[in-house]
Image (cartoon, rainbow, N blue to C red):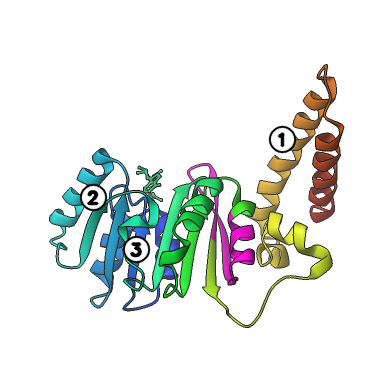
């Protein structure tokens, strides 16, 4: 059975898509999608030998070797430009996801949809989407086994930008669409973040050498979090 996190990601994969799952580990997601959608095809990318072998085992177990191909390599270097029209990158930090996208930019010209689930630092990926003409069209926040996860779906040049100029920084931090609904889990996440940020600011103020600019930046963000939780 696929985790709630990955099965939610799967709901955003368009029917019949040819997609790549970068950092696929066991290749659970591409195999699941191909088992339920007979027209789907996938390329699973892995940079490490161990996960590459696990992916191969899953693919063979479900007899999917004609539809899920596993390739060993770093980020987007394993796909040719034009090979896939949808891309999935989940279960890594936001900075890593962003650098994979940035380094592989030249291979994205036919990629209409990118689905990401950063474990931390979601803002980083939203910023990349914003600067690279991918519009966020859906965001989900969910809790599973004590973790809170965000899933962000971005489509190339969808006409409706969710951003407001004077709120851009807050929208990038909280998620432009998550901010519109503020679900129970969203509130839970930002309550946790509030305590964390208060602690960090306290520590920074106690330090011998204080970085005043950094403290001010953190305090500004803290005020956004407080505002959102009002
Ligand atoms: N995507 C799966 C998920 O969400 O459950 C697996 C997440 S796992 C924590 C992260 C995987 O990404 C690891 O198997 C790791 O080897 C792989 N990875 C990390 N950096 C990568 C890169 N630059 N290119 C391809 N794979 C990478």
* Label 2: how many Cα within 10 Å (few below 14, some 14–19, many 20+): many
Asked if disc 1 is less than 8 Å from ligand 1, the answer is: no
Identify the image quadrant of the N terminus.
bottom left
Q: Quadrant of residue 71?
A: bottom left
Nearest to viewer (mark 1 / mark 2): 2
* Residue 6 quadrant: bottom left
- The residue depicted at 83 percent of the width and 35 percent of the height is 215
Residue 94 x %, y %: 55, 49
Cβ of mark 2 under 8 A from ligand 1: no
Compared to 170, does 16 lie above or below? below
As drawn, the residue found furthest toward the top would be 208
Residue at the (80%, 26%) spot, across then down:
204
Q: What residue does disc 2 label?
A: 55
Badge 1 element: helix
Please state the extent of the stretch shown in magenta in the rendering: 125-151
Q: Earlier in the sequence, mark 1 or mark 2?
A: 2
Q: Is residue 19 above or below residue 103?
A: below
Q: Is residue 166 magenta?
A: no
Mark 1 vs mark 2, CA separation in Å: 36 Å
Label 3 near ligand 1 (CB < 8 Å): no
- Pick whichever, 64 or 112, lies toward us: 112
The disc at residue 20 is 3
Instruction: Check residue 196 in the rendering and tell me which mark sits there, or answer none.
Output: 1
Q: Residues within 10 Å of mark 1 (few under 14, many from 20)?
A: few
The structure residue drawn at horizontal position 80% and vertical position 55%, both measured from the top left corner, is 228
Identify the secondary structure beneath mark 3. Answer: strand
Q: Where is residue 131 drawn, in percent x and y? A: 63, 65
């Amino acid at each position: 059975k696929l985790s709630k996190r990955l099965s939610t990601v799967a709901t955003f994969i368009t029917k019949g898509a040819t997609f790549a799952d970068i950092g696929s580990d066991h290749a659970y997601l591409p195999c699941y999608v191909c088992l339920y959608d007979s027209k789907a095809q996938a390329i699973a990318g892995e940079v490490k030998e161990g996960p590459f072998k696990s992916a191969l085992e899953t693919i063979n177990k479900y007899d999917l070797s004609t539809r899920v191909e596993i390739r060993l390599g770093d980020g987007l270097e394993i796909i040719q430009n034009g090979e896939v029209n949808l891309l999935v990158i989940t279960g890594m930090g936001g900075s890593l996801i962003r650098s994979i996208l940035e380094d592989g930019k030249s291979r994205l010209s036919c990629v209409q949809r990118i689905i990401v689930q950063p474990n931390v630092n979601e803002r980083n990926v939203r910023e990349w989407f914003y600067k690279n003409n991918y519009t966020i069209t859906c965001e989900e926040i969910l809790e599973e086994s004590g973790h809170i996860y965000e899933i962000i779906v971005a489509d190339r040049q969808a006409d409706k930008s969710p951003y407001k100029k004077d709120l851009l920084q807050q929208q990038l931090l909280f998620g432009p669409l998550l901010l519109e609904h503020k679900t129970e889990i969203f509130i839970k996440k930002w309550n946790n973040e509030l305590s964390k940020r208060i602690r960090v600011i306290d520590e920074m103020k106690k330090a011998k050498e204080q970085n005043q600019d950094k403290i001010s930046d953190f305090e500004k963000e803290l005020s956004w979090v407080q505002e959102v939780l009002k």
